[in-house]
Amino acid sequence: MDSSETPEPASSVAAASHIPSCDLLSHTVGRPEALLPESLEQRGRLNLSDRKLSLQERSHTAPCSSPGLNGRYIYPVSITDLQDCVQLNQYKLKDEIGKGSYGVVKLAYNEDDNTYYAMKVLSKKRLMRQAGFPRRPPPRGAKAAPEGPLQPKGPLERVYQEIAILKKLDHPNVVKLVEVLDDPSEDHLYMGMLAVMEVPTDKPFSEDQARFYFQDLLRGIEYLHYQRIIHRDIKPSNLLVGEDGHIKIADFGVSNQFEGADALLTSTVGTPAFLAPEAVSETRKNFSGKALDVWAMGVTLYCFVFGACPFMDDRILSLHQKIKTQPVEFADISDDLKDLLLRMLDKNPENRITVPQIKVHPWVTRHGAEPLPLEDDNCCMLIEVTEEEVENSVKHIPSLATVILVRTMLRKRSFGNPFDWGRKEDRSSLCAPGKVLT
């Protein structure tokens, strides 16, 4: 694995719907009928109720005039250990609703805006150990820009720069990170998050439903590629549904930024069942980042219409072999969809269909009846970040309050995950979060 690439950083970056109700599990998210084109309205509203919720990041805070610390700002934090929760400023931190290798997630209620959030606590040491979030690789060869922006000196400064970039992403089909809290003297980063709904994939979609979601995914990926970001972990569980029923791409934990026309990648990261053949090849030294995302989009579309991945195996090496050699098998689908899937899942990345070609494919546009916007209309402008934005990308909080918070959270343990029902350990090779494979 190339040392310039980022193994698995530790965060999901997202934003989503406003959910004022206390009953998160029964909240129904759907696209308002008034926003549906007539053809979609006639086909019926997408059934997104009674689904488990994904927790992704977003919050709303106003600038603060507190004194600075090391060139950044300290934001005062008031913490109270209540009987049934921990009070963190306007947030009431309640039960733990998830945890992973890099931290825990607590359900949090914001009294100011009557919204349920999650508060994700990440380890900076582990972030720095993985050297980025996401990491910007150095320019490579003819595809790289001759001069790129100056890189931060240390891994934590690089974290701040990438957070600043992610906070400026602004697209209806990409989640938006708004705020990150940092304790400068302790090991934790705090991310305010909203609770939103995953795309339901327990049952296959009709082609109309799959097209509706896929058009959103396609617009979001075009925007990310325009912003020189390769996602590297596109899959249904990283696609979230907002209040309007539209897809939002989430979780940039293993993403890469690049200079020039495309990313030239050398490491293998992502979810095993969604990896492209070139990424698991023993002989290929490098590969196109954009082509990787297209392959993963193809696997995701296959999941939409068939309810399962095209290549599955409990053993990683056997799974890799199937991805590299096994033909794609189809049940009864339209010829247009079959053509699109075959071109997206072409095992030769040089022959694989590209995002601009997918946008005009007959299945995607319904033979021109539902054209997608031009790139200029979909992407607007290239994001650049200033030194000031990097400096202010993370809000610092006093360490004493953080220590109290962490100790109280650990003392009030609630390690069960209410969203973990039906999940099996032996399926981890197919659906686990992005891992580094060496």
Image (cartoon, grey):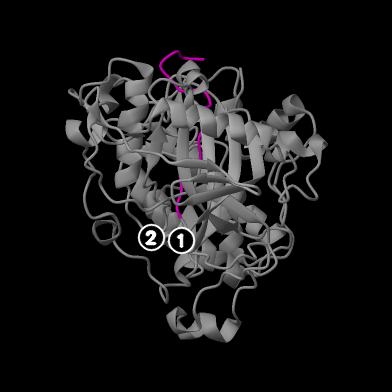
Residue 367 image point, x, y percent: 45, 72
Residue 168 or 185: which is nearer the viewer? 185
Query: Does the rendering let one see residue 185?
Result: yes
Judging depth in this view, the residue of 141 and 163 nearest the camera is: 163
- Residue that numbered label 1 is attached to: 216
Instruction: Point out the image quarter for the C terminus.
Output: top right
Residue 28 vertical position relative to residue 13 in the rendered view, above or below = below
**What amino acid does circle 1 point to?**
Asp
Query: Dot 2 surroundings within 10 Å: few (below 14), some, or many (20 or more)?
Result: some
- Contact between marks 2 and 1 (CB within 8 A): the answer is yes
Q: Is residue 397 above or below residue 225?
A: above
For the residue labelled by badge 2, is the local secondary structure a helix, a strand or a loop? loop
List x then y, in percent, for residue 269. Answer: 55, 28
In this figure, what is the number of numbered marks?
2
122 lies left or right of 438: left
Image coords of residue 425 (percent x, y): 80, 36
Q: Residue at x 61, y 22 (%)?
A: 437
Please give the residue where the numbered disc 2 appears in the rendered image.
172
Q: Earlier in the sequence, mark 2 or mark 1?
A: 2
Quarter of image, res 105 = top right
Residue occupying the point 37% across, 44% down: 179
Q: Which residues are magenta?
A: 1-15
Asked if the stretch drawn in magenta spans residue 7, the answer is yes
Does the magenta-highlighted stretch encompass residue 261? no
Tell me the element at label 1.
Answer: helix
Q: Is residue 217 left or right of residue 300?
A: left
Amino acid at circle 2:
Pro
Compute the Cα span from label 2 to label 1. Answer: 9 Å
